[in-house]
Amino acid sequence: MPRSQATDLYAVRENNLSLVLNMVRRAGAISRADLVRQTQLSATTVSALVNVLLESGFVVETGIGESSGGRPPIMLAFVYEARHVLGVEMGATHLTAVLMDLHGQIIGRQYQQFATLANPTGSINQITQLLQMIIAAAAINPSHLLGIGLAVPSPLDGENLDQLSTVIMPQWAGYDLKATLQPLFKLPVYLENDANAGVIAEQWWGRGRDYANLAYIKLGTGVGSGLIVKNEVYRGDGGTAGEIGHTTITSDGPLCRCGNRGCLESFVGAPALIAEVNQHRQINGEAAVHSINDIVAAANQHDPICRQVIDKAGAYLGIAIANLINLFNPGLIVLGGELAAAGNLLLTPVHQAVTQRAMSKAASEATITTSQLGANAIAIGAGTLVIHHAFQPANLGLTLGMKGR
Ligand SMILES: [Zn+2]
């Protein structure tokens, strides 16, 4: 047989294997007959593919399913604990690392405050330590780890997905997170923009499960959005789609770290909000706040300044969200990051601004809400990236071969 034909056959098998594996994963439990129906592959082919999955430990035979007349079928169940993945959120001022099963359940977590933007070497060492601590503390077989996902506070160039932006993170020029961590852990490493990781997490495990078009807005030191359009992350031509933090709110506003004036981030980014609260607090002779968490906690205790600052942030954010709705018409917009913990204190002014400014039909149809996944959303999304890649046809050989390594 010519080599190319053999390669083609191998590719067909990997495609079918990926199809069946993902189908069982999504269903949780499914019969061989339903797999045949849904894949439109032959019963013999499905049976052979299922045998590979049974042997790999990803799938087990379980109880008896509903009979549709004849003999009740044996069900195939996906084993969500068969392998594990690591996800890391690198924020500007913190690191969150999680260990998850294949159902997005966190079984280990480490958090560390750390100023990452100006300290690449320190950040890489810190990430390494956090991951080693999680692996050491967890009761899992380290050879069952499928990979590491890293969410970074930087747009990633579509052509060159491993390079951080030298505009947003100039001190990281020349550092390669993937090339450093991959040999250290002997695992595949995948990079993703943090807001993109957030929207992936929301669609896989959060409020976005029933939506094909949705956005996640990360409210942190930086402000960014991840967009899913027709079930695919929308990156744009050069990977910078969704940079909502650098859309202009007012043409003569405060200077932003991107060099422009009046960007959304310069109004609602954590440094701006903290500075604004502290300006008032200094005048009133009150103790300074140090984080968005401090501001949200004080607002929940009815602190009038903190409430006012969150209210104003919501109004600015609402302008940007109205623009987003007019441009993309998403069905769902999820707010994440520390500020999202303010809940209705933030959502109420957002809704007001959106109602006022967005095209009424699109605005009334869009659900705007805060993340159910909370502070871990982006780290969970980073881990999810590994699951997504591990079950792609091209990576299945490695993924299935990891058994008993
Ligand atoms: Zn900007």
Image (cartoon, rainbow, N blue to C red):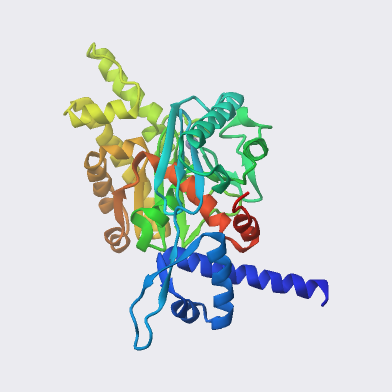
Residue sitting at the far top: 285
Residue 70 occupies quadrant: bottom left
Q: In this view, does 166 lie above or below 101?
A: above
What residue is shown at x 42% (from left), y 36% (from top)?
109
Residue 375, position as x, y percentages in the image: 36, 39
The spot of residue 138 in percent (x, y) is 46, 38
Decide if residue 127 is on the left or right side of residue 173.
Answer: left
Q: Which of 307 and 379 is in front in this view?
A: 379
User: Which residue is most to the right?
Assistant: 2
Q: Which of 121 and 312 is in front in this view?
A: 121
Rendering quarter of residue 299: top left
- Say which residue appears at 40% left-offset and 79% top-offset: 73
Name above or below for residue 178 compared with residue 279: below
Q: In which quarter of the image is the N terminus?
A: bottom right
Q: How many labels does the image show?
A: 0
The residue closer to the viewer here, 186 or 63, is 63
Residue 363 visible here? yes
Q: Does residue 324 appear to the left or right of 237 in the view shown?
A: left
Q: Residue furthest left?
A: 302
| Residue situated furthest bottom in the rendering | 69
Indicate the position of residue 369 as horizontal and vertical percent values.
29, 50
